[in-house]
Image (cartoon, rainbow, N blue to C red):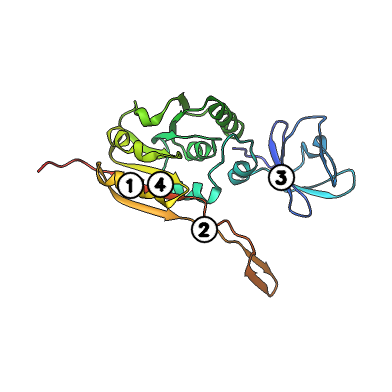
Amino acid sequence: MTSTAELRVGERVMLTDAKDRQYLITLKPGNAFHTHTGIVQHDDIIGALEGSVIRGNTDRGFLVLRPTLSDVVLKMPRGAQVIYPKDLGTILMQADVGPGMRVLEAGIGSGALSMTLLRAGAKITAYEIREDFAQQARKNVVDMLGEDIDYDIHIRDVTLGIEERDLDRVILDMPEPWLVVPHAAEALRPGGIFLTYLPTINQTQLVREALKVHSFGVEETVEILRRTWHIDGRSVRPDHRMVAHTGFLTSARRLVKTTN
């Protein structure tokens, strides 16, 4: 995290033009960013204050700001589809992720969930079956958060088992998480939270059925819909487009087994 308003060499910044088109770039001395509306020199941005308007060679202005985590998630290079910011925020709350928590994440894709959990202060052990996804995820995470992160990636199939024990959270973004439920029951500490992200309700139903027959309770499934509004004077209405269904989030608590 930066504590200065002045933009520096090596930082990533978000340029926004007059039509609200956004461009994510990394500042390098002597470089130029080319768009169909003009060329912006990196040297004109370096040393400027965040929130400034920088003029290109056609005198068109570009607002320059440091990108938010949401900006990076939507603009970063990806090997797999990312979880949308509206769902990432809910995951942090539904899984109650906080500093120092030991989290097992599986199906890391392009790293959007990883960087969200890490910035919340969690310690991540990640399982990913694809080496190319793992490499892209690590690069995206390091580009956003730097090298000083507690992020341990294993090329491993989580459906075959979880080595770690006494985990605080198990968070999954994968096609068949119901196969992981029995392993999560062994790996989570009592009271720990299991959470999975799935695109269809049929998959979600299978997870809920698996949770019932293992040591879990307090199950909840939610879907997040995001609608922005147009507000311009007396013209007030919902925007014509919204981010509707992206996935179902299902969470449960690991309970202590009881014997009759």
The residue labelled by disc 4 is 203
The residues tagged by marks 4 and 1 sit, at their Cα atoms, a distance apart of 16 Å
The residues tagged by marks 1 and 2 sit, at their Cα atoms, a distance apart of 21 Å
The residue labelled by disc 1 is 252
The residues tagged by marks 1 and 3 sit, at their Cα atoms, a distance apart of 42 Å
The residue labelled by disc 2 is 225
From the top left corner, tell me how far across and down residue 159 is, in percent.
37, 31
The disc, 4 or 2, on the residue closer to the chain's N-terminal end is 4
Front: mark 3 or 2: 2
The residue labelled by disc 3 is 50
Quadrant holding the N terminus: top right
The disc, 1 or 2, on the residue closer to the chain's N-terminal end is 2
The residues tagged by marks 3 and 4 sit, at their Cα atoms, a distance apart of 44 Å
Q: Does the rendering let one see residue 149?
A: yes
From the top left corner, tell me how far across and down residue 152 is, in percent.
46, 26
Q: Quadrant of residue 254?
A: top left
Residue sitting at x 77%, y 37%: 47
Residue furthest to the right in view is: 58
Residue sitting at x 30%, y 47%: 209
The disc, 3 or 2, on the residue closer to the chain's N-terminal end is 3
**Cβ–Cβ below 8 Å for labels 3 and 2?**
no
